[in-house]
Amino acid sequence: MEKNGLNGVVIRATSGFYYVQSGTHVIACKLRGRMKQNRYSVCVGDRVQFVPTGEAVGAIEQVLPRESFLKRPEVANVNQAILTFSASHPQIDFGLVDRFMVLAELSEIPAILCINKVDMANPDDLQSMLEIYRQMGYPVLLVSAKTGQGVVDLQKVLYDKVSVFAGPSGVGKSSLLNTIEPGLRLTTGELSQKIGRGKHTTRVAELLPLSGGGFVVDTPGFSFTEFIEMNPEDLRFQYREFRDKLADCHFSSCIHQKEPQCAVKAAVNAGLIAASRYESYSELLLEIQQTKRRF
Ligand SMILES: Nc1nc2c(ncn2[C@@H]2O[C@H](COP(=O)(O)OP(=O)(O)O)[C@@H](O)[C@H]2O)c(=O)[nH]1
Ligand SMILES: [Mg+2]
Ligand SMILES: [Zn+2]
């Protein structure tokens, strides 16, 4: 360890420069010569040690071990995923909620379900579905970027953590972040979608500092390509409420479809596992199996 080494977090990476936040300063760092051979292993979110080499410039000496790693977008040390959907415009698609939850479980990142635009719909209509997720242990927040409802609760959850905002486009992720931190001035609405389709589609993730402490990532879009790499047998473990039933299935390789004496199907029939979750599982399983056959 270098004597003058300072600690910081990589908040942005562009063509050979790593912008490291240390306290309230941001230092443009290069990698030290001996680190260059593994330069691809430094990414946004990494905690690093650097030495200043001039005014607001420095050299990264060391990358500290990662606690978690999100593949797409690439972000290290994410503490939680804020899975953002909207009560209306667009309406919440629970099949998609489950896909995002599978991705979070795969990366071992705790997920929080955040329902925005509650000013546009009666959230009572959603309560029974949301209760299913609460019972599985996923916190659920009801918010409105427009009226500010629930935003304080969301803010509390973000304090001192690295949070990734994920969800379909148009649900209000950027609007929520602007409400929490007006200084971010993120593009919202149609404009952001135009930009999304334009030349900035390959925008890389960036950690946006919150003045109260913590960082957020406004994902430029989520890809579900992880599913291509997944084995059908692995999907079982990504549905939280299935896990403690697996041991009771007759076959240890049971994927809860046509197999006899399946504890998961029995739990669905007994109302212990939500039918909607079993359906989304079966759909996703079929998709993964079909993709496997194609390759
Ligand atoms: N009524 C209402 N509209 C909202 C709310 N949050 C965002 N919007 C609108 O929804 C649209 C998409 O918002 P945006 O933040 O760009 O969504 P993103 O694609 O998830 O980042 C914009 O026109 C926003 O003004 C909300 O809480 N209530
Ligand atoms: Mg946005
Ligand atoms: Zn089974």
Image (cartoon, grey):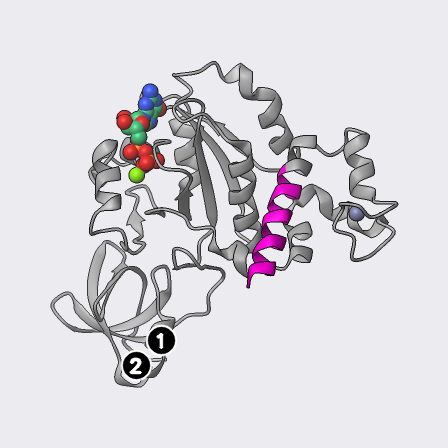
Q: Position of residue 216 (x, y in %)?
A: 35, 46
First in sequence, mark 2 or 1: give its number: 2
Q: Is residue 111 left or right of residue 54?
A: right
Screen quadrant of the C terminus: bottom right
Given residues 59 and 237, the one toward you in this image is 237
- Identified at 58% across, 27% down, the residue is 130
| Residue on which disc 2 sits | 36
Which element type, helix, strand or loop, lies under badge 2? Answer: helix
Which residue type carries mark 1? Gln
Which residue type carries mark 2? Lys
The disc label shown at residue 210, or none = none
164 versus 76 height, above or below: above
Range shown magenta: 280-295
- Identified at 72% across, 44% down, the residue is 242
| Front disc: 2 or 1 | 2
Which element type, helix, strand or loop, lies under badge 1? Answer: strand
Q: Is mark 2 within 8 Å of ligand 2?
A: no
- Identified at 46% across, 32% down, the residue is 114
